Amino acid sequence: MNDVFQSIKNEELTSKPSILDLSTRTDQERFRGLVRSGDIRQLVDDFEEQQRELFGITHPATVYAPGFEEAFQAHYARLARTREIWGHGRWVYYPWRHLVTHVLPADEYQLVRTARNQNLISKEEQEKFYNSTVGIAGLSVGSSVALALTLSGGAMRMKLADMDRLALSNTNRVLAGSDRLGMLKVEMAARTIYEMNPYAELQLYPDGITEANINSFFDNLDIVVDEIDNIAFKFLIRKESKKRKIAVVMAADNGDNAVVDIERYDLDPQPDYFHGRLGSVSFQQLVNLDKFAIGRTITQHIGPENITERMQQSLGEMGKTIVSWPQLGGAALINGAAVAYCVRKILNGQPLESNRALVSLDEKLLEGYNDAREVARRRDMTKDFARKFGL
């Protein structure tokens, strides 16, 4: 069986879909070839319903009026008279799923996908958000950011950087199943994004952010999201962002909560890296830190006073009873939503916190969280935690 396993394992499928226009003879022949070869094994055709939604969105006054369905059917019949329905729109072939699906052309697809965003996001805001280029470095929490951006109709163009492969222990906070274990995280994220928006334009950096590729990664970016663990390369991201006058958004999960940092290098000509929380540091000072020192430095950046009680207890157990700092899937989702919100606001030039925001479920949902006795208890506990960590 080893030879069978190896032959299957060695099959490499691209993580980018093919978009076919069956109104052209060339793509018709390509489609037939994919069916004959067995590469297409499943077909999804919901095109009539997509057209029905599009018709309603472009004729909103008729949706709840008598005769809407009759008017739509007349419209759909006119489409069918111009050419066969299969020749309208596009067919998206996903090689990793051996599946093809019939969808609207790019502009109409985006219009229908974001129809429920109106008027929470205006048409002008949506267009600016969608036509932006966002760089995301680190695809643990970063994968939640990428998905939140795509769900909300933003960032048609993304650059995704991560050197790691999906491990089973990642799947408590990364939206991926056992079918993607061992896959490069950039490929994993790309597949999910393309399944949501086949018209996305993605550039993948499977080596992560390096000194060699950071210039390429930053070219043409409108904003960067920093979700990497390596504090030295966090420093390089800020150095490059400052040079190019690009905002940085970063979120750290903190138990069930999130700590969101916003650094507006696009506005302030001389901001301190990390808002000055790490003092005067250099890349060389940071590059050789081990995992424990990285954890201590990140703790210093987040601030002991902002770290939850169980997270404080856990950091002292690294290398004893646990192998790394703990993270929760719910916090990753909160971080993703919070960062996507910040990205949209910054890209649209709207008012936004320019330093730090704490998104705390504990504060909002735990009874007695802000009682004086409980606040004093947490303060004393944090002082002891900071002393033990030398902070």
Image (cartoon, helix red, strand yellow):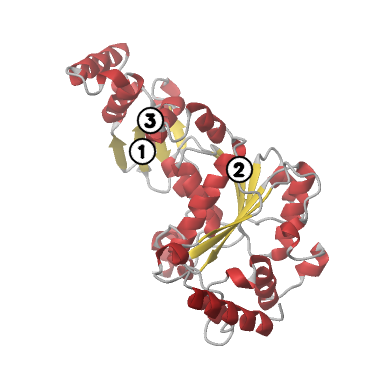
207 relative to 55 in the view: left or right: right
The image quadrant that residue 313 belongs to is bottom right
Q: Which mark is residue 219?
A: none
Determine the CA span between mark 1 and mark 2: 28 Å
191 relative to 390 in the view: left or right: left
Q: Which mark is residue 100?
A: 1
Determine the CA span between mark 1 and mark 3: 20 Å
Q: Residue at x 38, y 31 (%)?
A: 115
Could one spot residue 391 in this view of the protein?
A: yes
Whether 329 is drawn above or below 316: the answer is: above
Q: Nearer the viewer, residue 73 or 362?
A: 362
Cβ atoms under marks 3 and 2 closer than 8 Å: no
Please tell me how crowded label 2 is: few (under 14), some (14-19), or many (20+) other residues with Cα within 10 Å: many
Q: Secondary structure at mark 1?
A: strand
Q: Nearer the viewer, residue 86 or 240?
A: 240
Whether 285 is drawn above or below 153: the answer is: below
User: Looking at numbered disc 3 in the image, what kind of residue is underneath it?
Assistant: Val
* First reached walking from the N terminus: tag 1 or tag 3: 1
Whether 204 is drawn above or below 138: the answer is: above
Please tell me how crowded label 3 is: few (under 14), some (14-19), or many (20+) other residues with Cα within 10 Å: some
Residue 339 x %, y % = 55, 50
User: Looking at numbered disc 1 in the image, what kind of residue is underneath it?
Assistant: Val
Q: Nearer the viewer, residue 255 or 367?
A: 367
Q: Secondary structure at mark 3?
A: helix
User: Looking at numbered disc 2 in the image, what kind of residue is underneath it?
Assistant: Val
Of badges 1 and 2, the one in the foreground is 2
Residue 277 x %, y % = 73, 64
Q: Quadrant of the C terminus?
A: bottom right
Q: Which mark is residue 112?
A: 3
Q: Residue at x 47, y 54 (%)?
A: 11
- Mark 2 lies on residue: 134
